[in-house]
Structures are given as C-alpha cells and as structure tokens.
Image (cartoon, grey):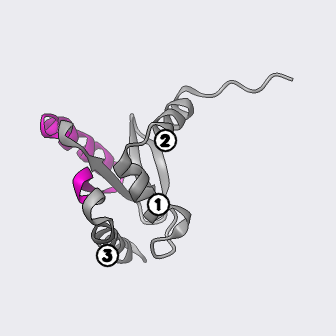
Amino acid sequence: MDSKPVKPRIARARDLRAKATDAERKLWAALGGRRLGGFKFRRQVPIDRYFADFACLEARLIVELDGSQHMERSQYDDARTAALEAHGWRVMRFWNNDVLENVDGVGVDILAALVLARP
C-alpha cells in the first residue's frame, strides 16, 4: 500500500526537527511534554512563510533561538519578527549561548511571558 505524499512544509518542519541544534534540543527538554507551567509547545511550526523554533498556540507565543549567524542577519530577523507579530504572535528571542549556559533562567523568562498572556 502506498503512503500519502508528505506536503513540502510538513517535510521541511520534520527535517528542521531532525537537525535541531544543541540549544534547541536543550530548550525542548525544558518545554516539551508540558513541562513548563503545563503549557503545550510545538517545534518548527510553520507560520506564514517562516518556521517558528517553538510555539505555544494557546498563548500565541513564539520562542526563537539565535546563534552567532544572526548577528549578520538582524534586518532579516527584525522583518521576520514583524511579520509574525502581524499575525498576532508575540516573539521572544534568546541567544543559543543563554540556553546552553542557563536554560532554567530562559525558562523563567518564558514562563513569565506565558502567565502574562493567560486570559
């Protein structure tokens, strides 16, 4: 029996999840399975023409991790953030280094934003 073809955006999201950075894996260990305040996060969520690193649909919060390559791409990141915000999302950005060195502190910041967004 033939399986259904996978849509390109779904395939791209799967590929991004499979190639997660160390920082993404570490943050996912803190966010996945409703481990942060009971909020459900998804990884590599297609939104508009972008893929959000992490998204909490309930709170409409996106968490993006930036490596050193983002220092040269700040205009692109600003435009990306503006586009996501135009779709009603709040975007938080953290440096990979912050996650690798202080994932608990990053989690506290994310949880504070989630609690503020709760109706």
Q: Specify the segment rendered in magenta.
A: 70-98
Q: What is the distance, in whole Å, between disc 3 and disc 1 at their CAs?
A: 18 Å
Q: Residue at 29% x, 57% y: name it.
A: 100
Main SS type for the magenta part? Answer: helix
| Residue 96 location (% of width, % of height) | 26, 51
> Magenta segment: does it hold 96?
yes
On the picture, is 28 further left or further right than 108? right
Going from the N terminus, do you reach mark 2 or mark 1 first?
2
Going from the N terminus, do you reach mark 2 or mark 3 first?
2
* Relative depth, front residue between 34 and 114: 34
> Magenta segment: does it hold 92?
yes
Q: Amino acid at mark 2?
A: Arg
Q: Amino acid at mark 1?
A: Ala
* Relative depth, front residue between 116 and 37: 37
Q: Which residue position is annotated with label 2? A: 17
| Residue 82 location (% of width, % of height) | 24, 46
On the picture, is 86 further left or further right than 49? left
Q: What is the distance, in whole Å, between disc 2 and disc 1 at their CAs?
A: 13 Å
Q: Nearer the viewer, mark 2 or mark 3?
A: 2
| Residue 35 in view of the camera | yes
Q: Which residue position is annotated with label 3? A: 112
Quick one: SS at disc 1? helix
On the picture, is 47 further left or further right than 64? right
- On the rendered image, what quadrant is the C terminus found in? bottom left
Mark drawn on residue 29: 1
| Residue 95 in view of the camera | no
| Residue 48 location (% of width, % of height) | 40, 38
Q: Nearer the viewer, mark 2 or mark 1?
A: 1
